[in-house]
Image (cartoon, helix red, strand yellow):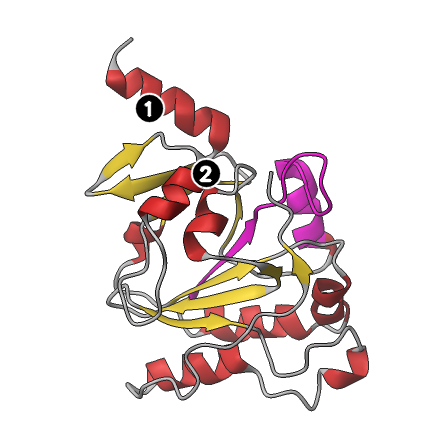
Amino acid sequence: MPESLSRRRFLARTGAAILVGGIATTLGPRAAAAAVQAKVGEAAPAFTANATNGSPVSLASYKGKIVVLEWTNHECPYVRKHYETGNMQALQREATAQGVVWLTLISSAKGEQGYVTAAQADELTTSRKAAPTAVLLDEPGVVGRMYGATNTPHMYVVDKAGTLIYAGAIDDRPTTRRADVPGASNYVRAALESVSTGQPVKTPITRAYGCTVKYS
């Protein structure tokens, strides 16, 4: 079978691939993650994953733009805290209005908490009035493992040069209490404000809190 055909079938089946030197690799999720690991202060690992409309979305295509990666699980009470208060949607709109690309990723395996089909993901975006640039499906967990996403929500910020400048929690209140949202220090907002003014991120790494990512 031609290599290009095999690669296309892999992408269609998994919805995600790692790009190493511009070439898609068919390593399994764990081996792929071991091959490329995200580190703050270094180039954000390249990846391509299918959006809910079936179109492949690559991180490389957004070079020259600031990118936020948000790992989510709509059934997780920590995620629900931020969506049911409108906190996540407000941050999405605030960021995208300034030209930031916001990619929401779902790495829950089929049969696990938080797994959704493309249609279900789109319905959630509509019903919650969310405003990401795109929702990417990472059922095999390739991208999630590559970035070391452990919790939902788990947040990352990539600068215009493609460097990972923030990884960790959305804020400093690791609870499910809605009342904690207004008084929290939002690490993602702070990182975006710093990068937009050319300043180093004051707190580039924090410990993510929430539900564990439900990998296969």
Whole-Å distance between the Cαs marked 2 and 1? 15 Å
Decide: is 184 above or below 71: below
- Is disc 1 surrounded by few (<14), some (14 to 19) or many (20+) residues within 10 Å? some
| Residue that numbered label 2 is attached to | 29
Q: Amino acid at mark 1?
A: Arg
Front position in the image: 65 or 146: 146
In the image: residue 87, left or right of residue 201: right
Magenta segment: does it hold 102?
Answer: yes
Q: Looking at the rendering, in which quadrant would you find the C terminus?
A: top right
Callout 2 amino acid: Pro
Question: Residue 161: x and y, percent?
Answer: 24, 67
Residue at x-position 31% and y-position 88%: 199
Provide the residue span drawn in magenta.
Answer: 100-126
Which mark is nearer the camera, 2 or 1?
Answer: 2
Residue 101 colored magenta?
yes
Image quadrant in which the N terminus is located: top left
Q: Is residue 147 above or below residue 205?
A: above
Q: Position of residue 8 (x, y in %)?
A: 36, 23
The reply to whether residue 56 is visible in this rendering is no
The disc placed on residue 7 is 1
Q: Can you give x and y, in whole percent of width and height, for residue 88 in the image?
A: 63, 70
